[in-house]
Image (cartoon, helix red, strand yellow):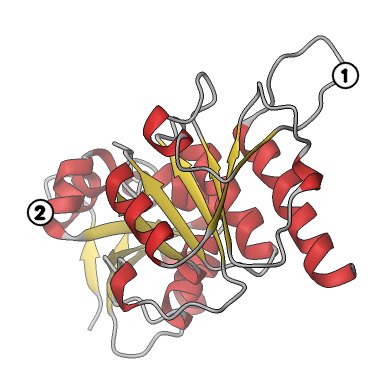
């Protein structure tokens, strides 16, 4: 049976709208919003539990997820919840956060550590690049940004559901990396070592700080090498997702083609 939602006074509509706008509410409920059929399918394929789906009439025939509660919602109401209105569909999905102590890592495992990243859109874009490179594990350290922020999900284009994402403190991050014998490479604008001049073929962690400042001193002191991306114009910094992409593809180049 399909439930119909046509009023903004609907408790389900209010619930979904609150999940979109309130980070603390998402954390409390351990649920979040995913918009778009492709991203919803990624959730399903990655074993995320879909609580229920909201869809407009003309997209109803696209749904093929048996056993999931379906809510038919008006176009006017769905446009108040999702950013990409033309998708005409969103789902409420349960949290599925990874636990780092349960992770089995390879001898050549590569981690990306984002220390206090500031922009959800950049985090999502980095996840997309990271997944495209075939890597799996990202640590967000000292970040106030919630993993399932709608802007992260949207910018990742579903890549977030294929990755292991961990939220740790700086101390927890350092303890894990040192205990597991990672070479730690910190991106630092004042370093004289070019990012190509370190070995990414062995187990390593790439640490990147916020765009407007550098990696914190606690992490900085534990880096085996500090690396820099040369710049030849008048700019003094690169977008965080661009910098991450440059370094990650050097790692791919060393691992696959050297």
For mark 1, what is the residue? 232
Q: Residues within 10 Å of mark 1 (few under 14, many from 20)?
A: few
The answer to whether any part of residue 184 appears in the image is yes
What is the C-alpha distance between the residues marked 1 and 2? 56 Å
Q: In the picture, which quadrant includes the C terminus?
A: bottom right
Q: Nearer the viewer, residue 251 or 30?
A: 251
Residue 33 spot, x, y in % from top left: 33, 56
Q: Is residue 198 above or below residue 204?
A: above
Q: Are marks 1 and 2 in contact (CB under 8 Å)?
A: no
Who comes first in sequence, dot 1 or dot 2?
2
Q: Quadrant of the rendered structure where residue 252 is?
A: bottom right
Left or right of 115, for residue 18: left
Query: At 46% from the left edge and 52% from the top edge, which residue is drawn?
Result: 153
Q: Is residue 36 visible?
A: no
Q: How many marks?
A: 2
Q: Where is 242 relative to 162, above or below? A: above
Label 2 CA crowd tier, 10 Å (few <14, some 14–19, many 20+): few
Identify the residue at the far top of this view: 234
Residue under the point 32% across and 43% down: 170
Seen in the image, is 236 located left or right of residue 256? Answer: left
The kind of secondary structure element at disc 2 is helix
Closest to the camera, between mark 1 and mark 2, is 1
Residue 208 is drawn in which quadrant?
Answer: top right
SS class, disc 1 = loop
- x, y percentage for residue 63? 45, 78
Look at mark 2 in the image and give the residue it sits on: 11
State the residue at coordinates (59%, 66%). 203
Q: Dividing the image into 4 quarters, which one contains the N terminus?
A: bottom left
């Amino acid at each position: 049976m399909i439930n119909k939602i046509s009023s903004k006074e609907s408790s389900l509509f209010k619930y979904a709208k609150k999940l979109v706008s309130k980070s603390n509410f998402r954390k409390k409920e351990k649920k979040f919003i995913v918009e778009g059929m492709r991203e919803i399918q990624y959730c399903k394929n990655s074993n995320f539990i879909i609580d229920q789906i909201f869809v407009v009439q003309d997209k109803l025939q696209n749904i093929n997820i048996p056993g999931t509660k379906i809510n038919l919602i008006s176009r006017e109401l769905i446009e108040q919840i999702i950013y990409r209105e033309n998708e005409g569909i969103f789902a409420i999905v349960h949290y599925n956060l990874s636990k780092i102590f349960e992770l089995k890592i390879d001898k050549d495992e590569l981690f990306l550590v984002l220390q206090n990243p500031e922009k959800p859109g950049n985090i999502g874009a980095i996840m997309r690049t990271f997944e495209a490179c075939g890597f799996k594990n990202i640590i967000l350290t000292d970040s106030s940004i919630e993993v399932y922020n709608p802007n992260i999900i949207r910018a990742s284009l579903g890549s977030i559901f294929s990755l292991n994402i961990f939220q740790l403190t700086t101390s927890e991050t350092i303890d894990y990396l040192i205990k597991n014998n990672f070479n730690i490479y910190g991106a630092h604008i004042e370093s004289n070592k070019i990012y190509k001049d370190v070995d990414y073929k062995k187990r390593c962690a790439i640490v990147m700080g916020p765009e407007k400042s550098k990696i914190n001193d606690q992490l900085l002191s534990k880096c085996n090498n500090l690396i820099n991306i040369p710049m030849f114009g008048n700019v003094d910094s690169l977008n965080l997702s661009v910098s991450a992409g440059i370094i990650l593809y050097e790692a791919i180049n060393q691992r696959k083609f050297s």
